[in-house]
Image (cartoon, helix red, strand yellow):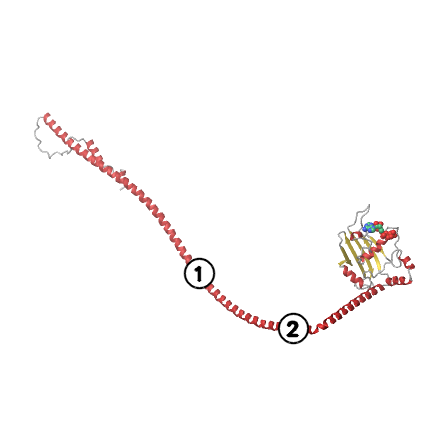
Amino acid sequence: MPLRLKQLDLHGYKTFATKSEFVFSEGISAIVGPNGSGKSNIVDSIRWVLGEQSFGLLRGKKTEDMIFAGSELRPRAGMAEASLTFDNSDGWLPIDFSEVAIARRAYRDGENEYLLNGQRVRLRDISELLAKCGLSERTYTIIGQGLIDTALSLKAEERRALFEEAAGIGTYRNKREDALRKLDATQHNLERVLDILAELKPRLRSLERQAQRARDFNQVKADLHAILKIWYGYHWYRALEELEQAKQAADEAAAELATQQSKQEDYDQEVGVVRAKISNCKLQISNLKQDDARLQTESQTLARELAVADERLRSFDAQRNSLSLEFSSLESQLAENAQRVTGAQAQASPPRPPKPNNKSRPRKRHSPSASPNARRSASARLNPSPRSPAWTGR
Ligand code: ATP
């Protein structure tokens, strides 16, 4: 029989803090060491990789016990890993690899991982693969320390059992036991069915009546179902027709809405034109109001000026009347003074012979007593200068 176990790698598993390799070459391999150096831990690691779940068999209580717990020189490890490499060149494992490495990892939080040729897989995948070649859980035998002594001292019957187990008969025995258990269960079920049948026999007629009623009920139910189908179908088609009519009405309403919207757009345009006109007119009104205000201001100014001119005119009229009166008084004074001068001249000189012709000399016509300056002053007061402000405004 060819050797199939090629190599065991441990890292962080129990005593093996650092990475340790065990290469199994042809022939017998032996691991030698003092007590407590970890020989049994190597065997435990093989069980562990093959998916052993019993901590009792692994000589621990929990997953953490599989991980290196630390020593005086080295801190504890966070993870334990063991990898078992098999030679599969003859295809004894149903997998397309000439070498198969099964690995298991455990972390301090209790999580376990399984790897098949470096790919993460489930425990179930490993178990199924091993079961196909007779290496499933508890179907292999590890002959531990002292077992050979025990085996030699066993009775013939007991020794036979041990050899059968080592030869792999255990798998088939387990299967046989499983099959027997199932057979027992089936026998038990059959007995129960027979019991139930015996129990039901006296109630057969009543059960037949109940069954008939159940069949009638199912028939009525099916009929009702068919009638309801017709009824709902009728209402369904009516609803569809109503829906169609409603859709048509909605389409018409939508068309009408579109027409009204188009009209509204026309109206909006007209309103826009009218609004523009209104705003133009408002502008004109505003201009006219401004003109009106300006003319009002001018008119008020002119009215004020007119009032002032009227006032001045009245004042001039009063002045003229006063001057006119003064002029009349001065003329009468002038006449009196001329008479007095004439009288005085007549008394002072002898009468002269009459002049031959008055018309032959140019006659100087002037008031005997009024001096030229007095006459100019009076005339100026009666006829004010045309440049006087009282006359410019009218
Ligand atoms: P013996 O020949 O007496 O049976 P052995 O070589 O088989 O001894 P093992 O039983 O494999 O030795 O190893 C036991 C040792 O492993 C103990 O000293 C124990 O402290 C150590 N050990 C077990 N679990 C761990 C762990 N998680 N971390 C560190 N050391 C551990």
Name of the residue lying farthest toward the right:
153
Q: Position of residue 267 (x, y in %)?
A: 42, 60
Q: Which quadrant is home to the C terminus?
A: top left
Label 1, ligand 1: CB separation under 8 Å: no
Dot 2 or dot 1, earlier in sequence: 2
Name the residue located 35 percent from the left edge and 48 percent from the top edge: 291
Residue 256 at least partly seen: yes
Is residue 303 rendered to the left or right of residue 185? left
Which residue is tagged 2? 213
Give the residue type that dot 2 points to: Arg
Label drawn at residue 320: none
**SS category of the residue bearing label 2:** helix
Q: Residues within 10 Å of mark 1 (few under 14, many from 20)?
A: few
Q: Position of residue 32 (x, y in %)?
A: 89, 53
| Residues at circles 2 and 1 in contact by the CB criterion of under 8 Å | no
Q: Is residue 81 above or below residue 327?
A: below
Q: Which quadrant is home to the N terminus?
A: bottom right
Q: Is residue 183 above or below residue 308?
A: below
Of marks 2 and 1, the one in the foreground: 2
Give the residue type that dot 1 points to: Gln
Question: Which of the 4 quarters of the picture holds residue 344?
Answer: top left
**SS category of the residue bearing label 1:** helix
Question: Which of the 4 quarters of the picture holds residue 333?
Answer: top left
Name of the residue lying farthest toward the front:
202
Is residue 389 rendered to the left or right of residue 150? left
Label drawn at residue 264: 1
Is residue 261 rendered to the left or right of residue 223? left
Label 2, ligand 1: CB separation under 8 Å: no
Q: Position of residue 121 (x, y in %)?
A: 76, 59
Name the residue located 52 percent from the left edge and 69 percent from the top edge: 242
**Which of these two is toward me, 148 or 301?**
148
